[in-house]
Amino acid sequence: MIRLLTANLTRIKKSKLFWSLCGIVALFAFIMIIYMIAESIKIIDNAITLFVIPIEIAAAIFISIFFGTEYSDGAIRNKLVVGHRRHIIYLANFITSVICSGVFVLSYMLPVVLLGFSCVGLPSTGAIKILAVGLVTLIAFGALFTMVSMIYANKAGATVINLVLAFMLLIVGYVLCSYLMQPELIPTHGIGNELEYIANPRYLSGAKRTFVQMLNDLLPAGQAVRFIYMGDAEPLWSLPLYSIGVGVELTTIGAVVFDKKDIK
Amino acid sequence: MEYVLQTNAVKKEYGRYKALNGLTMNVPKGSIYGFVGKNGSGKTTLIRLVCGLQRPTDGEIEIYGIGYKDKAAINARRRMGAVVETPSVYLEMTAEDNLKEQCRILGIPSFDGIADILQLVGLGDTGKKKAKNFSLGMRQRLGIAVALIGDPDFLILDEPINGLDPQGIVEIRELILELNKEHGITVLVSSHILDELSKIATHFGFIDGGKIVKEMSATELESACRKRVAITVNDTKILSRVLDESNVEYSIKSDTEAEIFGETDVTELTLKLHDNGCNVQKIRERNESLEAFYINLVGGKSND
């Protein structure tokens, strides 16, 4: 495992794509901070609660291309021929993808901390909680992208699938969040304190609400969207458990399929 | 005889298609084993199974006497290197970086032997040039160099001369011979180019339809492709009687044509046939090519 990780990380260190994506992620955060300064926004929390989305997209691109190259260049055969077990290869790649996401987070946070904290303001406790929970969300994303890249040997195909998944899941997350954010009562008519309220037909209640809430919390993208729109609203601390569950499940499925896969 | 690789009744099925159909082969230690077969006969499939890239549907594969399901097979695999189909190298890396990467994969802490391996395969002066800018022959040699990391004593090369120019073919041939003779590496080389294999192989395995149809040493093959005389007479029955009396090995092709194997005293034979009332119409010497031998073996059509 350590040997495979060392080999992967050495390749990453020399990867232009990886450092380019780190730069793009940092630039994204930098532009956001500059915008906040220009608009005299004094709360930096938005820059933090958003961090999962750009990193998720960067990870989708990098993980697909990095592991896809192993198939396209045939180098994965070198690992198998010399006797590395398949599940160890898979786990090493999964850990590699998590480390990559971690470096992307550091790249993103660099302008936030260096420029944002001094020029915009310090983050609230809620934003720091979201940062901690979001790191676990990124592990679930890493498990998803690793699974696709290790099962589907076509580099271009895996990249397209992962990117489509990344964006589609965000859309699903947005739709689910929009349902959950519906108010229970909506005003009908009246002025000021004389407003009359009726029940919102789009408000989800009972089992339906529980189901949609659970689905949204299960989906890593649902969590990412939730961080932006719903902040640190409870149940925030159950989200890492969902992410770990999803991550373990996807990694198990991926490792089992990869173990049985015929490699050319 | 000690064997590096033995397979017993190996089968591999992709859905309904049987790529290997009970293949049994034995690769002796220290040999250059020429694995000969036409395209689609199952050569690469077997190599994939031996390398652990795929699992057989049925049958047994033993590397250094250890079955592929055995936990110790992992250690046995560390003693082998392989280039399957295309060279497995990172195209964005230099030759040296590719070898360093393989050292890391194998857990070799020192990069000391890398320069020697690059020198051995003739890539000692490639410097900062990336593998993507290498010629096909250079990539093939780099693939072999990567396979040589870890000092293997069994090397598998799948169609190593495919697509190479004559110079590249000579270089690979000499490299294989050097690895075998000077470094004692057992080499399994698959190819459908028989003439090329006949120049280096000490043993042959002929595969057709997913089965080994013949395994033999180079000496046995040489005697199988021996000299013979093709003779046309007016009556092969008389010819047959004369040859039987002379205790000569022969083969009747038709009512008027036959082949006589080994060295033949043509004058003596002609006189004997004349005495028995048989006219010799045509006589010529032939050598059976390796290609013709293979075609006969697998039941195809020759151009002869």
Image (cartoon, grey):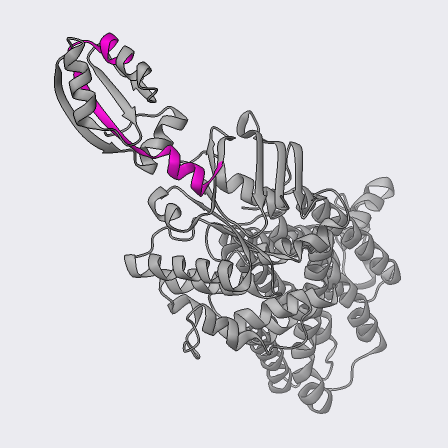
The stretch of residues the image draws in magenta is B216-240
Relative image position of residue A20 (x, y in whole percent): 54, 75
Residue A171 lies within the magenta run = no
Tell me the quarter of the picture where residue A239 sits.
bottom right
- Quarter of the image with the N terminus of chain A in it: bottom right
**Identity of the residue drawn at 41% across and 78% down:** B125
Q: Is residue A34 left or right of residue A226?
A: left
Q: Is residue B249 left or right of residue A98?
A: left
The answer to whether one can see residue A16 in this image is no
Relative image position of residue B34 (x, y in whole percent): 46, 44
Relative image position of residue A30 (x, y in whole percent): 61, 82
Viewer-closest of B129 and B302: B302
Viewer-closest of A3 and B22: B22
Viewer-closest of B201 and A219: B201
Image: B117 above or below A113 = above
Viewer-closest of B111 and A252: B111
Relative image position of residue A200 (x, y in whole percent): 78, 47
**Identity of the residue drawn at 70% across and 45% down:** B65
Image: A90 above or below A108 = above
Residue B232 lies within the magenta run = yes
